[in-house]
Image (spheres, rainbow, N blue to C red):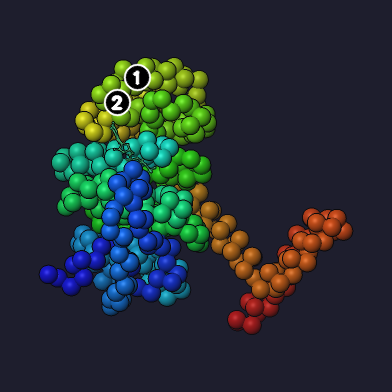
Amino acid sequence: MPENARIPEWSRDIDDSASAAKILHGVDGGHDGLPASREPLSSPPTPVRRRQLSSEEYVKGVLEHDRTILARTITLIESNAASHITCAQDVLKQLLPHTGKSIRVGITGVPGVGKSTFIEALGCYLCQKGHRVAVLTVDPSSSLSRGSILGDKTRMERLARAEQCFIRPSPSGGTLGGVAGKSRETILVCEAAGFDVILLETVGVGQSEVTARSMVDFMLLLLITGAGDELQGLKKGVIELADALVIHKADGENVARAEALRSEYSQALHYLTPFTEGWTPEVYTCSSLSEKGIPEIWDVIQRFIIVTTESGRFDARRRAQNREWLHVMLEEALRQRFYHHSEVARRLPAIEQMVLDGVLPVTTAVRELFSIFYATEGRANLSAK
Ligand SMILES: Nc1nc2c(ncn2[C@@H]2O[C@H](COP(=O)(O)OP(=O)(O)OP(=O)(O)O)[C@@H](O)[C@H]2O)c(=O)[nH]1
Ligand SMILES: [Mg+2]
């Protein structure tokens, strides 16, 4: 048995105190509809120390489709330790010319709508067709829903075993550029490793689908019957983010209800503004259990890619997404720098109190804080020269 063979490929191999990916203890049972286990789950494995690779070794491994090195590269990218950031940026820079050649698909919907099961069905179908599929999750809430790794590994059991598939649980925790910053870079690394379809699962209950939308080419919204719009968190804006709607779990006794809901949403779509210019979203039904409707959804995605590539929308969107990413990262960096500035942090509570007591106007408080920031920033810059 090769060394570390029993260690999952997503486990951390470097000092992870600064890592964005936190591996949580499993839950004892009852999670996610799974039966309670009699045996308590064992403690997480002791982190293994492996030799840190050079940036050339990371790049070579990824380009040669080495799954272990791919996983280690993502771990490196998720780390916020200064020494790792330098190496990660070097690796990314070298990988950049090999990225961008995949179809990036976002899958969203409320918890329990069947996103993971759908990804398993679509992913297996794509692997059979010869595609290489990477599955990532953008789920800022995953630190709260303990055990999501366990849940997804169980939902995607068949896909997880497929040679042409790579599943990566999401990082959690506030980091520079947030979870999204890391997910975007993870997409790039997976593309460089030859994955031509990226499936991004995100829970559709808030900001996360907006974030996911800014990373993908095509967005799929899963819906189920009997949940009611309110339950599905379906504000007009969420539906408007989607390039296609799917009434999921259209099997057994649910087929007729799913069909009725499909025509209801088809009507509703007439009143909404499509997210992608030149593309009219439609509503489909499918079942991941029976796999009925899965190939048709892939056909829709392919048609979308052809239509938007011909119109130039595809490239324009990717460019706009990169611009947005740059500015999101810049804003985050500025914010971090400001709030972590020692003098600002020291003086902020008193100034805040004066605002609360009504003795200092907010605009004056902002100006004062900025002059504190600039005064010492300037000195720091001068002394660095
Ligand atoms: N009948 C039927 N049940 C399904 C189908 N797909 C998923 N389910 C069931 O729906 C439940 C939730 O499935 P998941 O795939 O975990 O849902 P999810 O949207 O990923 O959930 P979260 O990750 O918690 O947000 C499971 O019990 C599945 O077995 C389907 O096509 N038909
Ligand atoms: Mg899921």
Q: Residue 211 carries which label?
A: none
Give the CA distance from mark 2 to mark 1: 8 Å
Nearest the eye: 371 or 145? 145
Q: Which amino acid does label 1 sit on?
A: Arg
* Image quarter of the C terminus: bottom right
Q: Position of residue 8 (x, y in %)?
A: 25, 62
- Badge 1 element: helix
Answer left or right for 368 relative to 359.
Answer: left
- The residue lying at 74 percent from left, 70 percent from top is 347
Q: Earlier in the sequence, mark 2 or mark 1?
A: 2
Residue bearing mark 2: 250
Which residue occupies the extreme left position in the image? 1
Identified at 42% across, 18% down, the residue is 264
In the rendering, at what x and y percent does residue 222 appear?
A: 37, 33
Q: For residue 354, what is the image quadrant?
A: bottom right
Expressed as whole percent of the image width and height from the top left, the position of residue 380 reads 64, 78
Residue at the image point whose x is 40% and y is 71% from the top = 16
The disc at residue 257 is: 1
Q: Image point 45% across, 22% down: which residue?
A: 269
Compare residues 156 and 298 and report the one nearer the observer: 156
Q: Is mark 2 within 8 Å of ligand 1?
A: yes
Which quadrant of the figure has residue 306?
Answer: top left
Residue sitting at the far front: 38
